[in-house]
Image (cartoon, coloured by chain):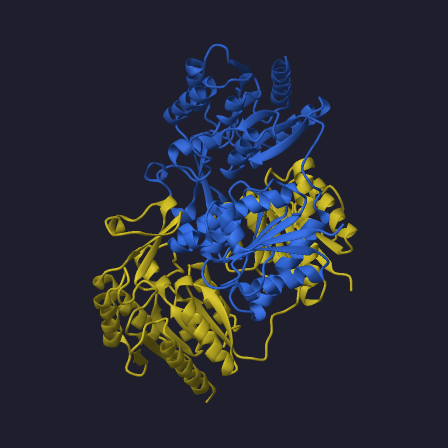
Chain colours: A blue, B yellow
Amino acid sequence: MEKTIVLIGTLDTKGAEYRYIRDRIVEQGCRVIVVDVGIRGKPLFQPDITREQVAQAAGLSIEEVASRIEGEGIQMMSRGAAKIVQELHRSGKLDGILSLGGTMGTFAGTAVMRTLPLGVPKVMVSTHASGDTSPYVGTKDIVMIPSMADIIGLNQITKNVLTMAAGAVVGMVKVAPGPVSSDKPLIGLTIHGDLMPCANFVTELLGQRGYEVVFFHAVGIGGKTLEEWIEQGLIDGVFDLVTTEVLQNIFGGLYDAGPTRLEAAGAKGIPQLVAPGKTDTITFDTTHGIPERFRSRELYLHTPVRVGTSTTKEERAQLGKVMAEKLNKATGPTAVIIPQKGFSGGDKEGSYMYDPEADLALINALKKNLKPDIRLVEVDAHINDRLFAEKAATLLDELMHEARR
Amino acid sequence: MEKTIVLIGTLDTKGAEYRYIRDRIVEQGCRVIVVDVGIRGKPLFQPDITREQVAQAAGLSIEEVASRIEGEGIQMMSRGAAKIVQELHRSGKLDGILSLGGTMGTFAGTAVMRTLPLGVPKVMVSTHASGDTSPYVGTKDIVMIPSMADIIGLNQITKNVLTMAAGAVVGMVKVAPGPVSSDKPLIGLTIHGDLMPCANFVTELLGQRGYEVVFFHAVGIGGKTLEEWIEQGLIDGVFDLVTTEVLQNIFGGLYDAGPTRLEAAGAKGIPQLVAPGKTDTITFDTTHGIPERFRSRELYLHTPVRVGTSTTKEERAQLGKVMAEKLNKATGPTAVIIPQKGFSGGDKEGSYMYDPEADLALINALKKNLKPDIRLVEVDAHINDRLFAEKAATLLDELMHEARR
């Protein structure tokens, strides 16, 4: 069946460029629906959905929108366009979406894309693909294509980039498997490269029990994505193995997933098992500098732009208290599991970061502050030992059964 | 002709995932060359180019590489892989490249991709697509696809993402127009949304004279890209209309292109015409905070995450001195052109940011510090007036002819 790609664009300032990419997409056998979100001059060609219709979808007239300062007007148009694309998607008329933009165009285009479900191809050709993309991509599956030179005027560079972007979105819609779905209960597992032995054991053991495990790399965006998926009801249970993001939020580390990390599962009432994986380490981006309090500690190179350092007993105790407070609010089955012989690859007997006293400070703070009905299970093993994974898989399976009762 | 996509990956830790995406690419009619850069366990399947060959290309044995700490070993493997893919590309055996990765994988995969020319499809499926991508993308045309969940294990989420990534890279290589080339001299023009009237006039006027104009959005990465293209010999002449990046480098603004901005054209000896576009404004990212010295000034909303504020006479004078020092080092035809009636959309008689005294401080600092053989032309017009664009196009055309003599 013929697939449809929706283009969201300003047909006044970038009319020629949208016409060019539209023609490249049609050449490859897809339909195109063009939505005009321009508010300055006249559209260069007739869109399928006009700017008047977009403004109306936002509850305004195009004159009202045009009278605002530009930043505000564009926000209004992206609200209207979001309603329109959601309706197109619901009625089966949107298989993929593409937009081109500089600063404002990227802001508006991705705001619209972020309202569409996971698995719908989303391509943003942008002058802001190299830099901090988190305001644009967020926790969504938006593909950012660097525009290299600016997407203004049709020259050898822009034609090259637009042709390739058309190829990318057409290639994606042709193979897109459609909405994500599975018969098996889906377990969200937070991971880190260092803890892959544990993650692999747990995945194998939970797989044997009929679960499917999805991994979230706990580097800030991973934890955020997990929690957003929990809120959306995509996740049935959580093994929060790597909780370093809570630590990094408290002390200003790079892998910060925000102040509400570790709260989504509890709020949603789904089963959660929590471990202190990688809470011995805090990570910094060398290009942005290292906070004062950590500068005198020993630093470990991860990549040339990332370094880690260990945390003290006091910091660990503070973390334990914060974690307990978050878990105490949980409305679903909740338990904590502790590997007594170390929390990370480096935190292991004989290894360079081994610090059992600091580990104990976290354990004691958890014990002191957790509500009595939240189980805390200690395992005489290192976090990467198979024994720890076995206990964890069994315990999570119990929590999943509790939830079903 | 059948196209070839090169996969760069660790066949030990992500063997199943690479096999899955390889099969999805082959299904769509492309050849695949798999390059194994793993240094931990055994490869899950036989690659086309082994880790031993990759280490050898870096001048080392795989045992030497494996004995290093992980971050270093991976850097060595990416150096070896870069040599291999460059050779594959030269011999016509690489039409596109794809890699999957977490922190280290993204670092290594993009380091390899950045060594390939503009216009070769480059796709990185990464846990780091939402966040600061500049260490990975840099000034290159690398497409970042968010992995959403981690790319470990084949589950409904990872299969969805890998299938779509295969679609994207296949779609791109099928339409890739090949190396960028043109018979017309290519002029790099720095722009900003605010100065589009000027940019459009200049493009039209230079087009009439037989030039092709490529736009660089001067938001940090745009200026960097322009200067890198100049170094690579892709640009024949420059109209540096928007030099706010120099200002933002001095005073800590968001649109910072580094301390060497405005020096590449001079070092290369190509003709350059320089204007003070948008040097009245400095921009900040509200999510990262605004430096102390600017907090008490009036702020203008650009998008919800970006604000601008105006600069003082003293700041403008300092900028003029810095610009003059940079231009004084130029080895090719160089001139400065000044629109006397304002440097930006807001810096215009009757408008909210109009400040002719501050503009004059910049002009005087340029006059005082520029070498006498660098022409400074003042035009009795606003930067967006057609008259200014006419004078600029004529002057740049003269500089281009000087260079040919």
Q: Residue at x 42, y 69 (%)?
A: B197
Please name whichever residue, A394 or A12, is drawn nearer the observer in this view of the structure.
A12
Q: Position of residue B129 (x, y in %)?
A: 54, 47
Q: Residue at x 27, y 61 (%)?
A: B353
Visible residue check, residue B52: no
Q: Position of residue B282 (x, y in %)?
A: 32, 57
Visible residue check, residue A48: yes
Please name whichever residue, B359 or B145, is drawn nearer the observer in this view of the structure.
B359
Count the marks: how many? 0
Q: Where on the picture, by quarter, is residue B317?
A: bottom left
Residue B10 in the figure: left or right of residue B242:
right
Please name whichever residue, B231 or B251, is drawn nearer the observer in this view of the structure.
B251
Q: Tell me if residue A119 comes above or below residue B213 in the rendering.
A: above
Image quarter in which the C terminus of chain A is found: top right
Quick one: which residue is furthest to the top in this view? A372
Q: Residue at x 39, y 28 (%)?
A: A312
Q: Residue at x 45, y 26 (%)?
A: A355
Q: Position of residue B312 (x, y in %)?
A: 23, 60
Q: Tell me if residue B237 comes above or below residue A394 in the rendering.
A: below
